[in-house]
Image: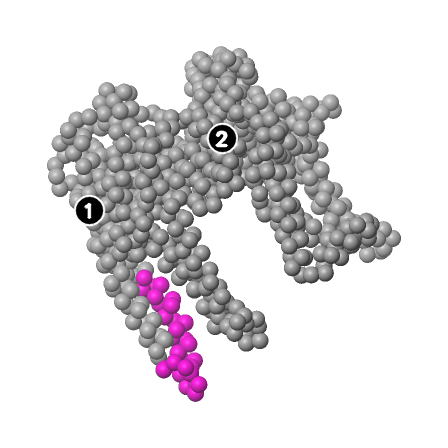
Amino acid sequence: MTASADTDFADVAAGDAVRSLDSSIRTIWTIKMAAFSLLLFLPALFYDLTHLFSPDSWLPAGALSGTVLLGGVLYCVVWPRLRHRAWGFALRPEEIYMEHGVLQHVRTIVPLRRIQHVDVSQDLIEREFALGRLVVHTAGSRSSDVVIPGLPLSEAEAIRDKIKRFILEDPLTEEPV
Amino acid sequence: MPSPPTEPNSDGRPDTPPAPDRPPDDEAEPAPSETAEDAAATTLGAIREPQRLHPLTLLLRVGTSLPALVIILFPLLRNPGSTENVTSLVFGALYGAFALPAILLQYWRFSYRITPKQIVIQSGVLNRKNRSIPIERVQNIQIERNLVARLCGIAKVKLETAGSSSTEGSLAYVHQGEARKIRQVVRSFQRGAQEADAATSEDAADTETLLDMPLRRVLLSGAFRFSLLYLAVIFTVLELFNPEALVERVLRARGRVGWVSEIVFSHPALAILATVVAAVFLGWVSGIGVHVARYYNFRLWLDGDKLRKRHGLFTVTEGTVPLDKVQALILRTNPFMRAFGWYELKVQTVGLDVEEQGHRVIAPFAGAERILELARRVRSVELPESFAHVSRLTIRRRFIRYTAVWSALLLPTVYFWPADWLHLGGVALPWWGFGLVPFILGWAVLQYRNHTYAAGEDGFYIRRGVLSHYLWILPVEKFHVFHATASIFQRRLGLKTLFVDTAGAATFAYPEVIDAPAGEADAQFSALYRRFRQLYRGRMEAEAGVPGTRLAPSERPRLPVDEPPE
């Protein structure tokens, strides 16, 4: 083993040289969370409106929908930022390293030779922002697909091609499982 | 239908079905390799012509569909004279007109063949399905023979691959000898033609029996598998047959039983005691019964580079596990077995068997020494001298967590407990549920005591379990994805959970290291990955001369690119 080989896995778990996601992923998350909050808010509003003039309401008027609205707005504003800050990934010569999670911190190493196949996917909102998601499939049970969201589409595709290249050029011909 | 099926031969022998709609890719196989493999194929008897299933399959399928017919005709059978039976007769006729031809057509339109590259199974009457399974993807070939199949001399062949979560292809049923031949052919194609001759004989010189279980051992083994599950099944079945009438008849028939039952019913405590004793006894006996039925005549042997086993009383199962497809080893023992030093050994494979949850029992019952010896035959296992405990703080975290969940369950019941329901000692009954809190603490302590881990040279060893003890052995070369996680509560206590994913791991009872001190977990996290990488670098060096990928430095995957690649 050469010295240079050693140095590039000194940082395996140190997480010093990680990249963060594209910042417009925050907007995408905000939109998605706003849609979710709206789903919660509408029933609350409906409840408040129907009980507006009822004499025996046990909540002051607008309390429920107000709370949901406040919580929803806070969620939409704060959560994407926290999530974006928590996200980091690195593509290294032999592995993908990633860390994410606001409440639950998760650090993951996916060795490139363990990858069964790689997809780049996009949903409707992501397409508007020209972002893509890298979906990495492994034979593991819990982590059978590992997702890196919020990459510029061209970059996601470049990563995908690099990983493919690595797998094709792997001198070991044994099966991945 | 593209081509009408011809009549089967009157002698009932499996003949080659007409008009094999071969997939186009098959024709495109390069001719030279085809001829080269043909030489091997002739000695092996590769099954190139599309084959039908065994004709007795028809009989068996009709047999299994008979219960449906009985249900349809039930009113008629009960009350033969009635005029209301017309509908059931119509349905019966419909059954005859559709179900039976469907079985026949399915049989005619089902064919399989095995080429050196793939197994092709064609099926379907209206929707033609053409499934080809690449030979090298086949992880396991299982031959199953239930009682009827054994009487008829036929067998079911199940082909499992890594990609799918269930059996990829199932041939039910083929002739018993044919089943063995299929397995041999597939295995020899996997190993390559040069070794093929060795594989043709069943008892070649390199077979070695690893474990034989005589009936006495199987009975003993069953005696340790007390299970209430089977009991529940028995009671459910009894439920269907109206047990009271049955019990009453038994009681009337025998005066002595009546006398016993009178005593038992004279006091509620006695009745409860009798029920518990009977339940325990029945659970024990049914456990033995089920165990013997499953593992009767258990034999495990090593055939070259694969493990093979055969067992079963009514349904004989024959399984093959190639040694290099073993993803992990699992040693298990329950409190009774542990008290006498008995263990069970399972291996984790990828083709997920629904019954065994991806785990294959290699040795149902053996002493500790024997089990370790067996495990060493499967993989190099060097049980580390000392195992490290997880952090003691795990007791606190688990205790708080379980208590919180338990309270969340109890408090609503306390709140909604009606005033006229049982109040023990002046408080509502659910309050007494909090009496279990000390036991929760005890459980958390036991979980801590039994949860240890160690990183050996060749693998990662994890021990877990309070009642059933588990020891997972994860070989370095089968590591897949590495995780280190810390929830918000774990971070407050400076703990982390470490998890090394393997292919085909069960979805429950993960081999996780829960609540290791954060620093230690992180160190272990990188150390395990480093070990994995070192192993594969060594292999790459052996293969290609350089310990790394063949890619030029500029082509290697690298992001972020703030530092220039060497």
Q: Nearer the viewer, residue B67 or B488?
A: B488
Image vertical order of residue A133 relative to residue B262, above or below = above
Give the side of residue B402 with respect to residue A100, left or right: right
Parent chain of label 2 = B
Look at the image and give the residue range highlighted in magenta: A33-61
Question: Of the numbered discs in the image, which one, if any, rests on residue B367?
Answer: 2
Image vertical order of residue B66 relative to residue A51, above or below = above
Q: Residue at x 59, y 36 (%)?
A: B222
- For the C terminus of chain B, the image quarter is top left
- For the N terminus of chain B, the image quarter is top right
Image vertical order of residue B23 relative to residue B234, above or below = above
Question: Of the numbered discs in the image, which one, if any, rests on residue A105?
Answer: none
Q: Which residue is mark 1?
A: A19
Parent chain of label 1 = A
Name the main secondary structure of what is drawn in magenta. helix
Can see residue B504? yes
Residue B506 horizontal/vertical position (percent): 44, 41
Q: Residues within 10 Å of mark 1 (few under 14, many from 20)?
A: some
Q: Nearer the viewer, residue B297 or B566?
A: B297
Q: Residue at x 34, y 47 (%)?
A: B514
In the orientation shown, which residue stands out farthest toward the right? B81
Residue B54 horizontal/vertical position (percent): 65, 27
Residue B415 horizontal/vertical position (percent): 48, 72
Residue B187 horizontal/vertical position (percent): 49, 22
Residue A53 covered by magenta stretch: yes
Task: Give the label, 1 or 2, closer to the camera.
Answer: 2
Give the side of residue B433 with respect to residue A12, left or right: right
